[in-house]
Image: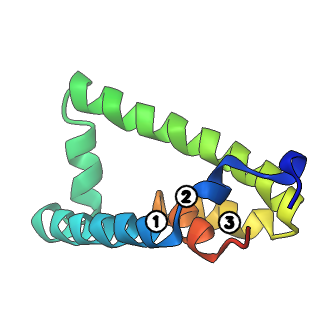
Amino acid sequence: MTTSNASFVDVIPKPFIALITIAFAILTVFSILDFGVLGIFVEATKNTATLQIFVDLILCALFIIVWLRHDTRRTGRSFPLWAIITLAVGAFGPLLYLLTRKS
């Protein structure tokens, strides 16, 4: 692999990404059990502090989708698929993308 084709994500160990994905999945399950899927959004918009964090996360997701666009072009993967997955399941989309990405 040449340096010009390398991406910063090529140095992230897959076991580390898997660990983050598992930990996030556990947190997600507990959140859904406590509040329900829609309840998470109700809590996120309860006051200006939680709304600010929620909007911040949406902006971060949009930046990740832009990165996905560039990376899928570079690696020959389907951008629409990964964009839809990211929009549907949030951070699980990019995490699964990284887990299945070939360096």
Point out which mark residue 82 bears: 3
Estimate the spatial distance between the alpha carbons at disc 1 and disc 3, rounded to whole Å: 17 Å
* Residue furthest top in the image: 48
Of mark 1 and mark 2, the one earlier in the sequence is 2
**Mark 2 = which residue?**
12
Tell me if mark 2 has few (under 14), some (14-19) or many (20+) residues whose alpha carbon lies within 10 angstroms of its own.
Answer: few
Percent across and percent down for residue 88 are: 53, 64
Q: Secondary structure at mark 1?
A: helix
Point out which mark residue 80 bears: none
* Residue furthest left in the image: 34
Percent across and percent down for residue 10 are: 67, 58
Q: Are marks 1 and 2 in contact (CB under 8 Å)?
A: yes
Q: Are marks 3 and 2 in contact (CB under 8 Å)?
A: no
**Mark 1 = which residue?**
17
Q: Secondary structure at mark 2?
A: loop
Which residue type carries mark 2? Ile
Q: Quadrant of residue 23?
A: bottom left
Residues 2 and 52: in front is 2
Residues 55 and 25: in front is 25
> Which is closer to the viewer, label 1 or label 3?
1
Q: Give the quadrant of the C terminus.
A: bottom right
Which residue type carries mark 3? Trp
Q: Quadrant of residue 77?
A: bottom right
Of mark 1 and mark 3, the one earlier in the sequence is 1
3 is higher (above) or lower (below) than 33: above
